[in-house]
Image (cartoon, helix red, strand yellow):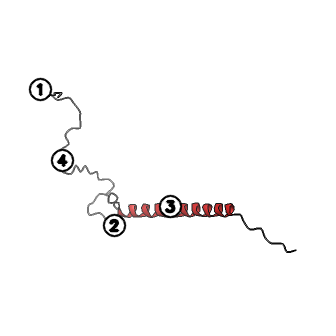
Amino acid sequence: MHATPAQPSRIEQAHLRVALAKKAAVVIAAAAFFMVFLLARASHPGQASTSGSSGGSGSSSSRTTDDDYGFDLGSGSVAPSTDDATPDVQSSVS
């Protein structure tokens, strides 16, 4: 008699296909995450490179900037209103 190698059952084949699909999904998800990370890093406007020379005599790291975009933010304290006037509120139920 001839010895034939055992064929995997349909269930075993399905398990192999599912395992392969899971591995492929993990690889694709990791690649997509890495691409989004690279795109976000490349397009992030908040970080400027410090290469090159500065125009002033001081170093750029020793300067502090308090850019408030033209708004006067005041002293930053929180206090109740000095007006004792209460707003007029009317409510009715119909």
Q: Which circle marks residue 71 in the picture? A: 4
Give the CA separation, mark 2 to mark 1.
58 Å
Determine the residue positioned at 33% across, 55% down. Answer: 61
Q: Which circle marks residue 29 in the picture? A: 3
Is the Cβ of the residue at disc 2 closer than 8 Å to that at disc 1? Answer: no
Residue lying furthest top in this view? Answer: 84
Q: Secondary structure at mark 2?
A: loop
Eye-nearest disc, 4 or 1: 1
| Residue kind at label 1, given as amino acid type | Ala
Give the CA separation, mark 4 to mark 1.
28 Å
Quadrant for residue 72, please give it.
top left
| Residue kind at label 4, given as amino acid type | Phe
Give the CA separation, mark 3 to mark 4.
44 Å
Point out residue 30 in the picture as x, y percentages from the top left corner.
51, 61
Q: Secondary structure at mark 1?
A: loop
| Residue kind at label 2, given as amino acid type | Gly
Q: Is residue 50 visible?
A: no
Judging depth in this view, the residue of 70 and 37 nearest the camera is 37
Q: Earlier in the sequence, mark 4 or mark 2?
A: 2
Point out residue 55 in the picture as x, y percentages from the top left corner.
26, 63
Give the CA separation, mark 4 to mark 2.
31 Å
Eye-nearest disc, 4 or 2: 4
Point out residue 33 in the picture as x, y percentages from the top left corner.
47, 60
Determine the residue positioned at 65% across, 60% down. Answer: 15
Judging depth in this view, the residue of 72 and 94 nearest the camera is 94
| Residue kind at label 3, given as amino acid type | Ala
> Which quadrant would the N terminus be assigned to in this image?
bottom right
Q: Secondary structure at mark 4?
A: loop
Residue corresponding to mark 2: 52
Q: Would you call the spot at circle 3 few (<14 residues within 10 Å), some (14-19), or many (20 or more)?
A: few
Residue corresponding to mark 1: 85
